[in-house]
Amino acid sequence: MKRAIYPGSFDPVTRGHLDVIARSSRLVDELVVGVLNNSAKNALFSVPERVNMLKELMIDFPNVTVDAFDGLLVDYAKRIDAAIIVRGLRAVTDFEYELQIAQTNHEIYADIETIFLTTRLEYAYLSSTIVKEVASYGGDISRFLPPQIVARVYEKYGIKDFEK
Ligand code: PNS
């Protein structure tokens, strides 16, 4: 059985993430979406909130599960018997960092392979960080996020009167 992990912060999950999940889940038997539990990062959503949001969105994906992990990604991959790491590549600017991480992970754990999916052009500019920036000023984030997530982001910024 081919099990892959798609790791990330998902703070919050964007339409770009969902696209990578949908496409990569078709390439493997089982995909585990792994939310990094990183206390050092100043997150908008708690890890349980992020895991729950992802779980809600995964209802239509029977071979996708959602979990939280901490520590090294390769240790977690080993624990859950995942041989593939999935990452999305948006632009050249992502490449150097992703290459370094993929090579480091492979160096630490030779049995793990990283595969990259290039994001669809419509999501090439999209990141959770940019979405949070726009939301914090009350800007329209509806085209960036799954509909179920939009209100929850505004709520975090105390914004109630946004367009639904
Ligand atoms: O969504 P992100 O923030 O780009 O995801 C980054 C993530 C979670 C994939 C990366 O930070 C990670 O794997 N962190 C766990 C620690 C680790 O294994 N780092 C890579 C080896 S240096």
Image: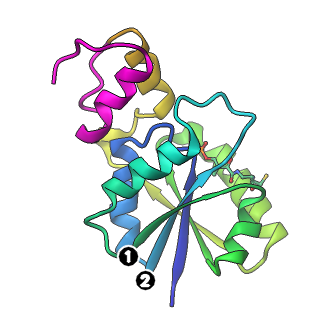
Q: Position of residue 81 (x, y in %)?
A: 65, 81
Decide which of 153, 26 is in the foreground and name it.
153
Q: Which residue is mark 2?
A: 29
Q: Is 81 on the left or on the right of 90, as rendered? A: right
Give the magenta-colored segment's residue range.
Answer: 139-164
Q: Is residue 89 visible?
A: no
Residue in front for this viewpoint, 141 or 120: 141
Tell me, yes or no, whether the two marked residues, 1 and 2, touch with CB atoms within 8 Å: yes
Most prominent secondary structure in the magenta stretch? loop
Q: Nearer the viewer, residue 35 or 16?
A: 35
Q: Earlier in the sequence, mark 1 or mark 2?
A: 2
Secondary structure beneath disc 2?
A: loop
Visible residue check, residue 133: yes
Secondary-structure class at tag 1:
loop
Q: Which residue is mark 1?
A: 63
Q: In this rendered view, identify the residue nearer to me: 128 or 122.
A: 128
If the image is split into quadrants, where does the C terminus sit?
A: top left
